[in-house]
Amino acid sequence: MLEKTILDNSLEKSKTKFEKRKTTCIMVICAFLPIAAILISLVIGRYPIPLPEFFNSVLSKIFHLNIGKPSTMETVIFNVRIPRILSALLIGSGLSVAGATYQGLFRNPMVSPDILGASAGAGFGAAFGILMSFNPFGIQLSAFLFGLAAVALTYLISVIIARGTNGILILVLAGMVISAMFSSLISITKYVADPYEKLPAITFYLMGGLSSITMKDIKIILPAFIIGIVPLILFRWKLNVLSFGDEESKSLGIDVSKLRIIIILCSTLITASAVSIGGMIGWIGLVIPHVARIIVGPNFKRLLPASIFIGGTFLLLVDDVARCAFSAEIPLGILTSLIGAPFFIFLLIKGRRGWQ
């Protein structure tokens, strides 16, 4: 009997060590996915660039080895490829981590980052900026501010209404109402816009794309992404506790109301920033957390980093398809919907137990 107990304990320890090694290997593979996607994205396109020549151009730029007018290759690398790659990584990883966090906060696998109205508000802000002939920075600022305003309005409505009732449910319903309102405002803006200049610009912007993003845009919006993502990563262990419910979380010393506000604020910063520079790119914040959950499990200590790696890789590869598949570039929002909708149905069928 004693020997059997010792053997069982030994097997359990071996199993635990194996699971830890397996998880570590999976996380390392996930971390290398964006690197592989970056290398692919650098070399493919209408102007193919071999990797050795790319590294030569980068080293020449860093050490100022070339004097005179930049070559066509350098222009493509530093003005087109690198800004698109960085923006795809930022937007993809940001929306994915925001989606995973919201799904944990609301304890609902069907939740996405736009549930509280951030995307619709930012979309209206961009449309309004284009209608008013703002410069590119003004359009991005308008989108960002309206995205924040939409979520602030949602939260204010929920605070006023949800007194002694289900606060989470009221918050979600308020988000749906605010999203519908800003979607209607977008429709009105498109209706009154000049059909020859403003309307095409609004439509193309809202469909999502990275073709016009510059390094200046990334530098401006990068602090918002960092401020949004870093606290979510630091508080990911609290999300594990929050999954047990509000009462259990409070009994373990978690200030649920404060944590909820921090999560909503950070996720809103990320979503509004993403829409302000890339347009309304859907499905990433809904699908990618499910993919990450199937791969690494529901533990948020692993789920959020995996969502960052997989989300950035996914959008980067989708952007490669958008700019290389046809002679005219395909808007990212169309591609992510075409890929995300059927893939999400597949995930629901195959991985429905992963949420448990």
Image: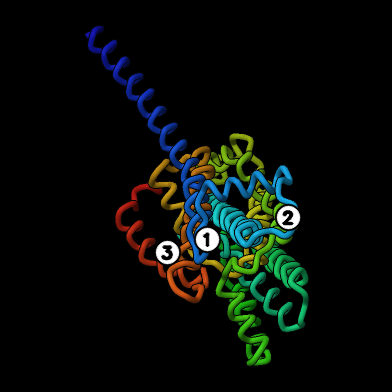
**Residue pointed to by mark 1:** 112
Q: CA distance from mark 3 to mark 2?
A: 29 Å
Q: How is the image coloured?
A: rainbow
**Residue pointed to by mark 2:** 219
Q: Amino acid at mark 3?
A: Gly
Q: Nearer the viewer, mark 2 or mark 1?
A: 2
Q: Is residue 300 left or right of residue 259?
A: left
Q: Nearer the viewer, mark 1 or mark 3?
A: 3
Q: Position of residue 127 (x, y in %)?
A: 67, 78
Of label 2 and label 1, which has the lower sequence position?
1
Q: Is residue 249 visible?
A: yes
Q: Nearer the viewer, residue 32 or 16?
A: 32
Q: Position of residue 39 (x, y in %)?
A: 50, 49
Of label 3 and label 2, which has the lower sequence position?
2
Image vertical order of residue 111 relative to residue 291, above or below: below
Q: Is residue 23 left or right of residue 199?
A: left
Callout 3 secondary element:
helix
